[in-house]
Amino acid sequence: MLRIAHLLEAQLRAAMERALPEAAQAAGQPLDPQLAPASKPEFGDFQANGALPLAKPLGQPPRQIAQAIVAQLSADPAFSELCLEPVIAGPGFINLTLRPERLTAEVAERLADPRLGVPTAGEDAGGQLPAPVIVDFSSPNIAKEMHVGHLRSTIIGDCLARVLEFRGHPVLRLNHVGDWGTQFGMLITHLKQVAPEALTTADAVDLGDLVAFYRQAKARFDDDETFQATAREEVVNLQGGDPLSLKAWGLLCDQSRREFQRIYDRLDIALSERGESFYNPYLQAVVDDLKAAGLLVIDDGAGCVFLEGVSGKDGQPLPLIVQKSDGGFNYATTDLAAIRYRFAPAPEGDGAGRVIYVTDAGQASHFAGVFQVARRAGWIPEGASVEHVPFGLVQGEDGKKLKTRAGDTVRLRDLLDEAVERAEADLRRRLAEEERTEDEAFIQQVATTVGLAAVKYADLSTNRITNYQFSFDRMLALTGNTAPYLLYAVVRIAGIARKGGDLEGAGLAAAGDGAGALGWLSFTEPQEWALIRELLKLDGVIAEVETELLPNRLCSYLFELSQVFNRFYDQVPVLKAEEPARSSRLALCRLTADTLKLGLNLLGIPALERM
Ligand code: ARG
């Protein structure tokens, strides 16, 4: 409906200019019709509130201003083709209702459009190819287990990448893995002593052991000064390119990488690994650049940039440390090198127009600091944007940090296994109740899809900024705002086709020439119009997710659409209706299924035909 909204906005603006030339003159800029979706369905489709703020400057009652605008609007034949006669409500709101034949024409167009009315970013920009968007997500640390925070980043980041890709942006999905720095010094030093084979032979230890070794190494590092010194030397060896250290490092990375990949494969998530080590050759240049820009201050031996507008507890300005007093670089230096590289024009860099970082909210001040320094250093081009997409903690049902019953951190693999096992148990119970027999392959496929979909959807459907309570029972429920509920709506529509409804044919007929399509699509019932209006919101919702980066908006929309569809299907006959209602309603069923499938796909969830 965005295209219609833009048309209406232009018509309203022109009407305002004709009705109120003095106001337009005085404002020195185009008048704003303040067009918004209607606040209640009985008010129509849109409301324009632009008359109200003009009352004071014009010294006229707002209703009178609205009247003048409406008189001009009604005189515009293009407007009358779109809308019924406007209605002035309350103090001077202009309520607008689209003509039923306009809505029907929109439905016909969407039935014929594989993109369901969602334009590409290129079309928006008049055919220009948009600059790449980088989504930095997942990004676990080598030799450490991937935790639920990384799972959130993985699921949210993948969804945002999918939405941006669907809109036609060239997207780089970057896995900024923690594969560099002090942890390797510790680990290599420790392994040299306790398990040297791990440093020379692939797969000598498994990731579980590696994580345990890392924990031991960290403990020694924290209270043994000689160990600390050796570990630091190891880091220097590694960063200096010592072949043995590099080999050991490579083996350790491979091992973790394979473990991470298993999770990505299971969740059907594509990522390109470009870890912290990639930016090693650029770290010195970052510090040099900052120095040349006059931003670098040596404080207590460390290279810092003092942040503007950010002060610590004592009121002193806070520094972003970019080079430690021992000459080493840190997480912030790497992120500065990354940002510099990502915005630098190709071939020296990625030439990105937008860079998005998906991490827990705990890193907000890190990114605020990095973004500020990058901006002041001139690395972020005009018109480009850099955004941190923060999310809250994953909590158990007790509201505390998610733990296993034994009190350990939850391993992702176990968490996904449990979701699938529970989905399988639910399914077997339901099949028994419904006295259905299905083969094992069906059961496995449905349980896997539903279990993983439930985990993803539970994460995506809550506002990411708040903490989120992990509950298998809630996420697997067949009712409420859950993945099974949405999957079930798609299955229900597939069932209509199995019962003899020609869903594909309904679409194809509409795909014919516009007039022909209009000829047979015919809607009369309020439930049909409610469903149509809901279906036509898709493009607006996607545009909103694209700018605000909030997947829960898409989830709420799909949930609302399923509910409106279910109401339609429960209250209006479809297969038993007479023509042309029957075909018209089947066409709505098909468009609903296609919209739900597209939406689920953007959430990273495959739809099922039966469940
Ligand atoms: N490895 C980090 C962590 O586990 C996340 C990295 C996020 N991306 C970035 N460019 N800093 O917390």
Image (tube, rainbow, N blue to C red):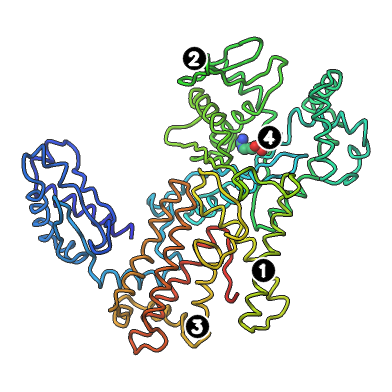
Q: Quadrant of residue 414?
A: bottom right
Residue that badge 1 annotates: 447
Q: Does the numbered disc 2 mark a residue whose Cβ is under 8 Å from ligand 1?
A: no
Q: Is residue 208 above or below residue 239?
A: below
Q: Quadrant of residue 182?
A: top right
Q: Amino acid at mark 4?
A: Glu
**Mark 2 vs 1: CB contact within 8 A:** no
Label 4: state its secondary structure. Answer: helix
- Which of these two is toward me, 53 or 560? 560
Q: What is the quadrant of the N terminus in the image?
A: bottom left
Q: Amino acid at mark 2?
A: Gly
Looking at the image, the residue that sits furthest to the front is 398
Percent x, y of residue 246 = 82, 33
Residue at 72% in and 75% down: 441
CA distance separating discs 2 and 1: 56 Å
Q: Earlier in the sequence, mark 4 or mark 3?
A: 4
Label 1: state its secondary structure. Answer: helix
Q: Earlier in the sequence, mark 2 or mark 3?
A: 2
Residue that badge 2 annotates: 315
Percent x, y of residue 150 = 65, 45
Residue that badge 4 annotates: 276
**Mark 4 vs 3: CB contact within 8 A:** no
Q: Earlier in the sequence, mark 1 or mark 3?
A: 1
Label 2: state its secondary structure. Answer: loop
Q: Which mark is residue 497?
A: 3
